[in-house]
Amino acid sequence: MTLWLLASNVLLLILLGGLGFLVLSLARQIGVLHERTAPLGVLRQAPGLKLGEMVPPLQAPDLFGREVDLSRVGHGLALLFVAPDCPVCSSVLPAFRALTESQMGTKPLSGYLVSDGARIDECRVYAESCDINPRRYLISQALALQMQVRLLPFLVVIDAEGRLQAREMVQDSRALSRILSRLHLPESGDPVSAP
């Protein structure tokens, strides 16, 4: 009888340990989700660039380290701020590529991806795995700070005149489509570039 009592106590201790591990894992995930969603209210109230205002000259290096002058593109810019380890960014990327390509001839947009470059090797692997043109993948923490990016993925759209048209967090492909479809960009026959 004592053997059964001892076995049941050991089993209960193992189950209690497993339950404790599960609770700690869930608490960690809740903390991560809280971090990602907490700044959302601050983001909407952030001072700085307002829609319709002129954007200062923008420059950032691509994955090869070559400086890209975004002010001299000659047509609208769509900057999607992403991170290689962000699953939402990866799910939005095909829609971003398709939408910037579909704007050809009607709403000229040159699409660029932007990362902070903290882990440049991961960015290169991410670009290869997603078939992203390395010249369309910019690495710049300063650009993210200038555009006041707080959450990812984050879309910034600038028209050909250099005015800020959109600056929003993108949660899914429908939100991305909604943002790009409501823009009033000048008509042009210039080709569009996509990442």
Image (spheres, helix red, strand yellow):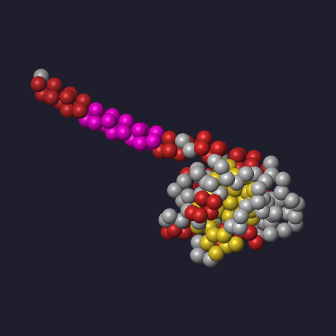
Residue at left offset 67%, top offset 73% = 68
Residue 15 visible in the snapshot: yes
Q: Residue furthest front?
A: 47
Q: Quadrant of residue 60?
A: bottom right
Q: Which image quarter is the N terminus in? A: top left
Residue at left offset 70%, top offset 72% = 69
Q: Is residue 99 left or right of residue 130?
A: right
Q: Nearer the viewer, residue 19 or 52?
A: 52
Q: Position of residue 127 (x, y in %)?
A: 58, 66
Q: Residue furthest top?
A: 1
Is residue 10 shown above or below 48?
above
Q: In the rendered structure, does residue 187 fall within the stretch colored magenta?
A: no
Q: Is residue 29 left or right of residue 77?
A: left
Residue 97 visible in the snapshot: no
Is residue 15 shown above or below 97?
above
Q: Nearer the viewer, residue 193 or 75?
A: 75
Q: Position of residue 26 (x, y in %)?
A: 42, 38
Q: Is residue 154 left or right of residue 13?
A: right
Per the rendered image, the range of residues in magenta is: 14-31
Q: Nearer the viewer, residue 160 or 44?
A: 44
Residue at left offset 11%, top offset 25% = 2
Q: Which image quarter is the C terminus in? A: bottom right
User: Majority secondary structure of the magenta segment?
Assistant: helix
Q: Position of residue 140 (x, y in %)?
A: 59, 66
Residue at left offset 78%, top offset 62% = 162
Q: How many numbered dots are placed on residues in this image?
A: 0
Q: Position of residue 90 (x, y in %)?
A: 59, 55
